[in-house]
């Protein structure tokens, strides 16, 4: 039986973004600005969903002064060892690329309305313990990063489906062609047809005890990772034949 026939609603789009956390909102804004028809589906509500729901306080990736992307990469490895124990390695390529482009990310965030400035209209640099540079970490007051990003996303042409959980990705050969979803408030069954998808469902660490030193063991389990993040994002990618990498890095 065709899924279209049993669905309450069928939506067609160019790009489906699964998850409206920091990553999903940013991906949605950028794709819509490029002229794509975009749907962002968020299981919870983009205003306060995901790991940054309560806000975050530092932007730790904008190389400044003598702190090169390589310095940041080394620092990240030290941090990882401190949190997760010896023998846990960051993916150097991923982090190098992230740190190299962080200035661009920084400027884009400011442009779409996430301010990093304080009341005196200036930035507030603090030392980064692992790098040794006096001013290499940017202290931000991002208690409202999620409402700000949600607003930025809704100003674009993107369709934002709040309280909509993606269940599975639909495939045709190696291509993603859509997804099944339901509205968690009304129970409505939705089919979203798309040409490509970005899965930005964040981390998942609540249902296991982290293999980490005691100071981080329970922090990882209870402090991070809202209950809505139950691993279904990774499971849907796995079922669709995608590669799962860096699985031991949890929220970092
Ligand atoms: C207490 C705390 C403090 C932090 N402080 C900082 C900091 O100061 N600086 C910093 O850089 N980082 C900080 N972080 C980390 C930062 O918040 C995360 O790295 C960031 O939020 C990750 O963004 P993301 O988009 O990948 O995931 P998230 O922002 O977690 O978003 C994932 C989204 O996907 C949604 N979702 C999941 N499954 C589905 C589904 N099946 N269908 C639809 N939607 C789904 C979730 O509801 C969620 O909204 C902190 C984290 C925590 C917990």
Image (tube, rainbow, N blue to C red):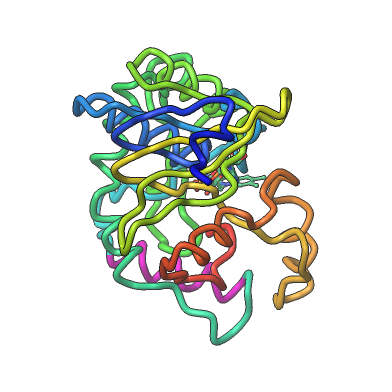
Q: Residue at x 38, y 12 (%)?
A: 155
Q: Residue at x 29, y 64 (%)?
A: 96
Most extreme residue toward the left is 34
Q: Is residue 195 left or right of residue 58?
A: left
Question: Where in the figure is residue 161, as x and y percent of width and height?
Answer: 53, 25
Q: Is residue 209 left or right of residue 237?
A: right
Most extreme residue toward the bottom is 87
- On whether residue 74 falls in the magenta region, the answer is yes
Rendered position, 85 above or below 153:
below
Rendered position, 19 above or below 202:
above
Rendered position, 154 above or below 48:
above
Rendered position, 202 above or below 188:
below
Marks counted in the figure total: 0
Q: Residue at x 79, y 73 (%)?
A: 214
Question: Where in the figure is residue 197, as x and y percent of width and height?
Answer: 37, 46
The region drawn magenta spans 70-82
Q: Is residue 141 left or right of residue 131?
A: right
Magenta-colored segment: predominant secondary structure: helix
Question: Where in the figure is residue 7, as x and y percent of width and height?
Answer: 56, 32
Ligand 1, seen in the image, is in the quarter at: top right
Tell me the quarter of the picture where residue 146 sits: top right
Q: Residue at x 53, y 25 (%)?
A: 9
Question: Where in the figure is residue 145, as x and y percent of width and height?
Answer: 52, 27
Most extreme residue toward the front is 1
- On whether residue 20 falls in the magenta region, the answer is no
Tell me the quarter of the picture where residue 241 sits: bottom left
Viewer-closest of 63 and 155: 155
């Amino acid at each position: 039986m065709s899924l279209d026939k049993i669905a309450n609603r069928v939506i067609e789009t160019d790009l489906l973004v699964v998850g409206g956390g920091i990553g999903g909102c940013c991906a949605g804004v950028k794709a819509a600005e490029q002229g794509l028809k975009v749907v962002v589906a968020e299981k919870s509500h983009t205003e306060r969903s995901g790991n940054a729901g309560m806000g975050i306080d530092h932007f730790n990736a904008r190389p400044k002064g003598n702190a090169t992307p390589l310095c940041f990469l080394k620092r990240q490895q030290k941090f990882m060892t401190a949190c997760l124990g010896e023998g846990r390695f960051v993916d150097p390529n991923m982090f190098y690329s992230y740190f190299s482009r962080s200035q661009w990310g920084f400027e884009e965030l400011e442009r779409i309305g996430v301010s990093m400035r304080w009341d005196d209209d200036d930035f507030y640099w603090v030392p980064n313990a692992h790098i040794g540079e006096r001013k290499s970490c940017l202290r931000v007051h991002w208690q409202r990063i999620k409402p700000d990003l949600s607003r930025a996303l809704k100003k674009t042409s993107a369709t934002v489906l709040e309280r909509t959980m993606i269940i599975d990705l639909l495939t045709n050969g190696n291509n993603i062609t859509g997804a099944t979803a339901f509205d968690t408030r009304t129970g409505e069954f939705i089919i979203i047809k798309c040409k490509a998808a970005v899965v930005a469902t964040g981390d998942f660490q609540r249902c296991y005890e982290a293999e980490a030193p005691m100071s981080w063991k329970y922090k990882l389990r209870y402090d991070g990772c809202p209950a809505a993040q139950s691993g279904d994002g990774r499971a849907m990618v796995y079922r669709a034949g995608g590669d799962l990498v860096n699985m031991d890095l949890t929220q970092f």
